[in-house]
Image: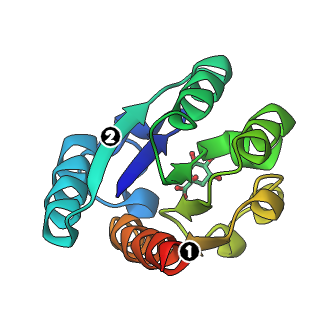
């Protein structure tokens, strides 16, 4: 099975950016851990990062042609991008939303996600581990629908 994992804006600065909130793992460390775990689960994964809304939408559209599931951390787009929400809804792939930080314990504006209604669910507050939990969830979801 194949998973498309998308990191949204500013996540390329992980390890440098607000490490008290997002942890010390660098962007490359996180991707290494994700790829290693995907290998253990025998999941083929392609990882993308973009700071641009339109590029994220293009990646979601393209995933329609090859992926079985989406894992997405939309960064701040989470809170206001109806365009990303519509893209996820349009491709009809099961999607899992991940946030490194516990968005519910932070500023008020982070508590609301316009993306969540078109996802299977959210994993928030577990740092890097959140992506690994999302991989487990994606695998089980896809296997269940093919059984
Ligand atoms: C984030 C939470 C968002 O509110 C924020 O804008 C981010 C990162 C997270 O992973 O915790 O860029 O998505």
Q: Is residue 79 above or below residue 113?
A: above
Residue pictured at 78% horizontal, 66% vertical:
111
Say which of marks 2 and 1 sits in front: 1
Residue 39 in view: yes
Q: Which residue is mark 1?
A: 145
Residue pictured at 58% horizontal, 63% vertical:
96
**Disc assigned to residue 9:** none
Q: Is residue 106 above or below residue 83?
A: below
Residue pictured at 52% horizontal, 36% vertical:
63
User: What colouring method underlies this structural image?
Assistant: rainbow
- Badge 2 or badge 1: first in the primary sequence: 2
**Residue 73's x, y, as percent?**
54, 50
97 sits left or right of 34 in the view:
right
Q: For numbered disc 2, what is the local secondary structure?
A: strand
**Residue 86's x, y, as percent?**
82, 39
User: Which image quarter is the N terminus in?
Assistant: bottom left
């Amino acid at each position: 099975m194949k998973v498309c994992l998308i990191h949204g804006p500013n996540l390329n600065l992980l390890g440098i950016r607000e490490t008290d909130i997002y942890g010390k793992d660098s962007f490359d460390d996180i991707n290494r851990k994700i790829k290693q775990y995907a290998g253990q689960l025998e999941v083929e994964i392609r990882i993308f990062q973009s700071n641009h809304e339109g590029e994220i939408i293009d990646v979601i559209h393209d995933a329609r042609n090859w992926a079985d599931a989406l894992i997405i951390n939309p960064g701040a787009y989470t809170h206001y991008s109806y365009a990303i929400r519509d893209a996820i809804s349009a491709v009809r792939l099961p999607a899992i939303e991940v946030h490194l930080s516990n968005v519910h314990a932070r500023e008020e504006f982070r508590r609301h996600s316009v993306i969540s209604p078109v996802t299977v669910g959210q994993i928030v507050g577990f740092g890097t581990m959140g992506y690994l939990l999302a991989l487990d969830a994606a695998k089980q979801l896809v296997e269940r629908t093919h059984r």
